[in-house]
Amino acid sequence: MRLKYKRLSLTLCLVMLLTPPALSGVEFDQLNDYVTITDHADFDFPRPFTILAWINPDDWGDSSNGRILDHGGGAGADGWAILVNDTNDTLTFYENGGSGAGAVHGSVNAITLNVWQHVAISVGSGGAYQFYVDGATAGNGSGLIDPAADTDDLLIGARDTDKNREFDGTIAGVMLFSTDLSQAEVQSLMRNPFSVSANLLAHWPLYGKDSTEVDLGPGGHNGTITGATDGNDNPPIGPMISAYSGFTAAPVSAVRRRQNVLIGQ
């Protein structure tokens, strides 16, 4: 009987150790909130590439163009931005540089306020843009040039050129890939953010528990929070994102070790 109790106690301890906290993301309130990641060539995005994130927008953001991610997406700059806008309640990819600026948009009413949704833009080498929301196709487009290389920092939650166009709501699980992921791969990453690792450039869970947001990708592009807070007043994303383990205060190696245990690697 005593041996059974010991086994039960050990099992409970293992469950507690291996059960990560549900991810609530980082909350942005349009009051000078953003996460800054130092500029790197990984963010210049010659095609193909894919951008993914979990978002829970409270509103459409500053001037109804709330930035999810921005690397030179402002007037007079070079680079790109992914944002939500209320023109058609949708997701937009905007770029500057080369022969001019341009934008492609997802489907009308693709984005819903006040709920968690997984968004992705996958761009092929030929310039075909495919939008996904919660793993389902949500529009497509073409006709843009490659974004021009930008020397400004990468920002999550605001425009990098002037810190305006702030996102209003919560963002989590931002990922960048140097390939055009398929719909099946986007759906897989929505369920398990560690299910695809080939061509990964960066991966910010966005825990909001420290001033530094760790990058779980190969480049170690850690970010610094300004103003924003953790999104604990929002419901956690749920079991799909609870695959994340560890907080930013933990060593990256420890976080990755826990990931490997959780996903059976």
Image (tube, rainbow, N blue to C red):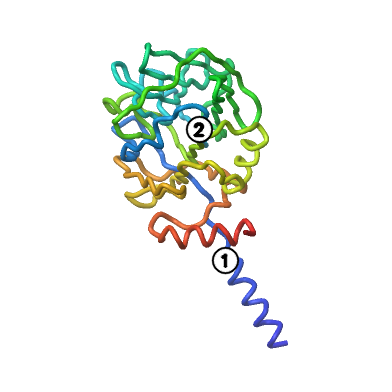
What residue is shown at x 43% (from left), y 58% (from top)? 252
Image point 30% across, 32% down: which residue? 31
Q: Is the C terminus in the top left, top right, bottom left or bottom right quadrant?
A: bottom right
Q: Which residue is mark 2?
A: 51
Question: Which type of secondary structure does the marked residue at label 2 adopt?
Answer: strand
The amino acid pointed to by label 1 is: Met
Query: Height in image: 190 above or below 137?
Result: below
Q: Quadrant of residue 77?
A: top left
* Residue 25 in the image: above or below residue 168: below
The image shows residue 113 at horizontal and vertical percentages of: 52, 27
Q: What amino acid is found at the position of numbered circle 2 in the picture?
A: Ile
Q: Is residue 37 left or right of residue 217?
A: left
- Residue at x 47%, y 41% (from the top left corner): 201
Query: Where residue 239 appears, x then y in whole percent?
Result: 62, 48
Is 126 above or below relative to 254?
Answer: above
Place of residue 68 in the rendered image (x, y in percent of width and height, measured from the top left): 43, 30
Checking the image for residue 16, the label placed there is 1
Q: Which mark is residue 94?
A: none
Q: Earlier in the sequence, mark 1 or mark 2?
A: 1
Q: Residues within 10 Å of mark 1 (few under 14, many from 20)?
A: few
Looking at the rendered structure, the secondary structure element under dot 1 is helix
Residue placed farthest to the left in the image?
A: 162
User: Where on the picture, by quarter, is residue 151?
Assistant: top left
Q: Could you tell me how far apart the alpha carbons at marks 1 and 2 are, in whole angstroms?
A: 33 Å
Looking at the picture, how far across and down is residue 11, in whole percent? 64, 73
For the point 73% across and 87% down, the residue is: 1
**In this rendering, position of residue 125 left or right of residue 191:** left
